Amino acid sequence: MALFDKKNKKVTKYRRYSFLNIGTLLFGTVFVYMVICMFAYLTETHIMPYEVVRGNLSGNFRYQALSLRTEEVVRASQSGSIRYYAREGSKVSADSTVCSVNESGSTDPVTYENFEPNERDVERLHNVMSGFVTDFSEISFQRTYNMKAGIESILADMTKDLNTDYISVQNRCNAPDSGFVIYGTDGFEEVTSAGLTNDMFDLNNYRLESLRTRKQVKAGDVIYKLITEEEWRLYFPMDNNLVTELTGQENIRFRFLKDNQTFTAPFSIIRNGSDSFGEIIMNNSLVRYATDRFLEIELVLNRKEGLKVPVSAIVDKEFYNIPEGFAIVNEDTEKEITLKVERFRSDGSSEISYVTANVYSYNEETGVYLINKNLLKEGDCILQENSAKRKELTDNDVTVLHGVYNINKGYAVFREITVIDQNEEYCIVESNNIYSLSAYDYIVLNASEADVDQIIN
């Protein structure tokens, strides 16, 4: 038993390994490398590519057009409760009854039995509510009241035929002329083209007062309007670029986005001080749009087609003009030439070398190549192969080109472009030049973030 206890008291010590071993060093090295790579990725500028496609700019000219008509305001001749009979937007003949004013001021509610709306009434209510949902904006709550007035107007139309007691009313308000009936005022009734301002096209400031929702009127109050002429006009604001493009154009093709109807109508430009407005004269279709003061339209212009390039991708670069007599043409590709260049050292001696350069443009009429200015410097001489002719480069040999950075090869290559159409966001450029762009090329989206020959990550 003593022997057993003695053996149990024997302790074996295990070997301890140092913290600084090969595994720790490898793991630490990898960890530091990952941290450095992550920091470099987060701090470096990332180049966003853009794929060049064919297209035009026809879908970028949408405006809220102001509709001005010949409108006659009709006022109440006496005070009392008012009831309307004519449907808003319908055309009434002269001396036909539009509404009546009850001098007694009775506003007793009317109940209807066995009333059921027809399909047309349901569709009209659906159009008003769906239009409100589509155009809803939290900063323009006035449209909520416009929807309420529209629904009440439709309900009044739906129930007016169920009323038989209005026939005995003597105080009828008959239309002074024939025209389209409108139950709303907005302050544009007497506005003409000479009084147009850009502020009028801000829909946040637009207010429509519904007349049909009132139960009582006073003598002299406006009770409805009549549009008495079939001719009406649309106006929309124009910037300087659009004025330049449409100057001299006598007709214009456009589309109403409300119902996707397309028209061609006479067109002219109105100038009020520094503001310019397009004027479209309409001689038909007033019945479709009589109740709308503002209509969203899209100009359908005969825009030029080509390669669609973002404005942000365009940059100006300087290039040297190289006469074709001093260029050694690369037979494998038309986009490269070789130059025999003589450079002078600081001690006055010179050295001759051959430089290969990408061709960014070639003018067949003048026989001049354009190459990257960074490849050469002022004072260098280019020599003609197998000849004693030489040409010293100066500032007079520099040309500025309009172009983009092509990144098909993984690095930025400048390509000249010729802009044939433009708006605020995109340009349309020609595509029939081997030194320029082609469809499905990739370019730098923001040219300010890249430079010639830069490697694109």
Image (tube, rainbow, N blue to C red):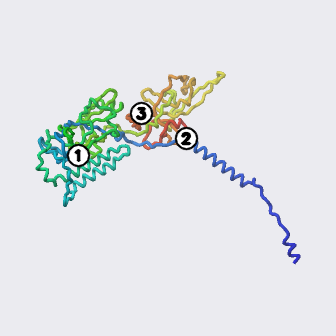
Say which mark, if any, is on residue 212: 1
Q: Mark 1 vs mark 3: give the one in front.
A: 1
Position of residue 54 measured from the top left corner of the image (x, y, whole percent): 39, 42
* Amino acid residing under circle 2: Thr
Helix or strand or loop: what does disc 2 sit on?
A: loop
Q: Is residue 417 or residue 301 the one in the foreground?
A: 301
Q: What element carries label 3?
A: loop
Q: Nearer the viewer, mark 3 or mark 2?
A: 2
Whichever of callouts 1 and 3 sits on the residue coming sooner in the sequence is 1
- Residue 42, image quadrant: top right
First-in-chain label (2 vs 1): 2
Q: Disc 2 designates what residue?
A: 45
Judged from the image, the secondary structure of the residue bearing numbered disc 1 is loop
Q: Is residue 276 above or below residue 78?
A: above
Q: Can residue 171 be seen by looking at this rendering?
A: yes
Q: Which of marks 2 and 1 is in front?
A: 1
User: Any mark on residue 418, and which?
Assistant: 3
How much space separates mark 2 and mark 1, taking CA atoms? 61 Å
Residue at the spot x=37%, y=35% of the render?
421
Image coordinates for residue 250, horizontal then vertical, percent = 25, 32
Label 3 vs 2, first from the N-terminus: 2
Outermost residue, right side: 2
351 vs 68: above or below: above
Q: Residue visible at 56% across and 28% down?
A: 376
- What's the amino acid at mark 1? Arg
